[in-house]
Amino acid sequence: MSLDSKRRAPSAAFSFLLPLAALLILAPIFRAGNRPLPLLALELLALLIFVQIIVHRQSPWASLGRGECLAIWLLAAIVLLPLLPVPASIWVTLPGRALYAEGQSLFGENSGQQSISIVPFASQVSALALLPPLAIFFGTILCADRTRQQLVYVLLAIAGVQALLGLVQYGTQDAMFYLGMLPSYAAQGSYPNRNHFAGLFEMAFPLAAALFAASFGNAAPKARRYRSKGLRGAFAAIGEARIRVYVLYLLLLTVFGLAIVFSRSRTGIALLILGVIVSAAAFAPRLGGRQTMRTVGGVMVLLGGMALAVGLVPVLQRFAENDPVADGRWSIATATLEGVGTFFPLGSGAGTFPDVFRRFHPADISAFVNHAHNDYLEWLFEGGLLAGGLIVLLLALYLRRCVQTLREEGWPRERYLRIGAAIGIFLIALHGLVEYNLRIPANAIFFAFLAGLLFAPAKAVRQTEDAPRKRHREPPNPFPQAPPATAIDLPNPFAR
């Protein structure tokens, strides 16, 4: 590699940092991007990233496996195929379209051709809303490892600001801090929904835990000369390491945990506990083995004590007063399954759930239902068989990538971040069983960023402190001795 190419490579990698960071920062500012104007700004910024990828002539497909490429093309097919026009005579015969064809005939709106989607405009909006997540995913795959780490810091800073805003909202109960939204008197940051607010920290908490483990774990081998095992040896290394980093990550973990608790999201609090346990189990080999679980228990007790001191009683009352099973989600899920069967295997079209679900609206729910409160059922409702195949494929790719990450050798910082991203994806995927986090633009962008961290190509592991060190060589002797004389076979003159 020439000197000029070496100089151009960092600038090309760094050029991805600004637009990707801007996309992460702007995503949650105004109601998590769940409004037309902020969503339009995110889409324009995503187009800028795509243009930048084309200008730099970098292909993300070369960095992805066949399974990942197939998943992306399948996702594009789910969104774009419903926009294809078909003759009206064929459209009537498609599953679930007959009722709408009768309604159109009453008003004389039958045309020669019609899109497969029942609500074409909604499908067009969904197709455009897919641009920001794809842009952040491709950009994360293509950028350098250092840039990815800087983007993680940006995400943690965003989550920290959101957490502080949420704590202020819960502590003051002042409508001014809800930024014009309807006050819920719970922590919700700039998110209209506290469950989606909790979803942000379900993704950010494992990343903060990963960076803490990376700093703590890489310093632990230095403490071996202290001849102490477990966490004692690790704590012995703190004196030589950057203690401010440990304090910062511990502070972030504490603030993130309190933000989830005071969001009063039942699923969020349950997933917080699960996230702490899974993160401790994943990073325990680097933090002292079994003794780490004791420390985790102590941290959870400390976190619960702080929450109780601030005011945890209203949060606990929500668990006692409201039955999680009897809040209408089961009725919505049953009606959604009915719609899945009606439109199977094509589905109703991407983004059509709010309009089409009125046909299956449960009688025991008086409020308007805009989402199924289950990401997977809503995908099946809109995408049909292709959506079901995509869910299975994504699950298989996720499990395979997790196994590959766990089998890697060495513990560079990138491996910690991949494990943290995998835990965050796992938590938000579980939350998708009872919510629609991935329908919120901000959380969809953060989820795509975590996916980019997880599926980014792993480079060769550099020699770290865990690798066997070279044997110490003696310094050269400044006063070298003369080499010993070698015996020369000469004839003896005194021999007879």
Image (tube, rainbow, N blue to C red):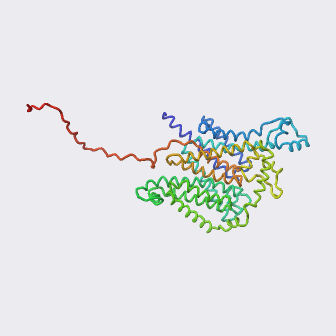
Compared to residue 294, the image places residue 6 above or below, namely above
Task: Kindly identify the residue that appears in the image at 71 percent across and 47 percent down.
Answer: 39
Identify the residue shown where x is 61% and y is 53%: 204
Please name whichever residue, 72 or 244, is drawn nearer the observer in this view of the structure.
72
Which of the 4 quarters of the picture holds residue 180?
A: bottom right
- In the rendered structure, the answer to whether residue 220 lies left or right of residue 12 reads left
Residue 246 x/y as whole percent: 51, 57
**Can you say which quadrant of the picture contains the C terminus?**
top left
Percent coordinates x, y for residue 340 in the rendering: 78, 47
Image coordinates for residue 421, horizontal then vertical, percent: 59, 50
Choose top left, top right, bottom left or bottom right for residue 391. Answer: top right
Q: How many marks?
A: 0
Left or right: 5 in relation to 35: left
The part of the image, by quadrant, that contains residue 483 is top left
Q: Residue 452 versus residue 99: which sits nearer the camera?
A: 99
Q: Is residue 58 left or right of residue 495?
A: right
Horizontally, is 42 left or right of 56 in the view?
right
- Where residue 378 appears, x then y in whole percent? 74, 49
The residue shown at (54%, 60%) is 293
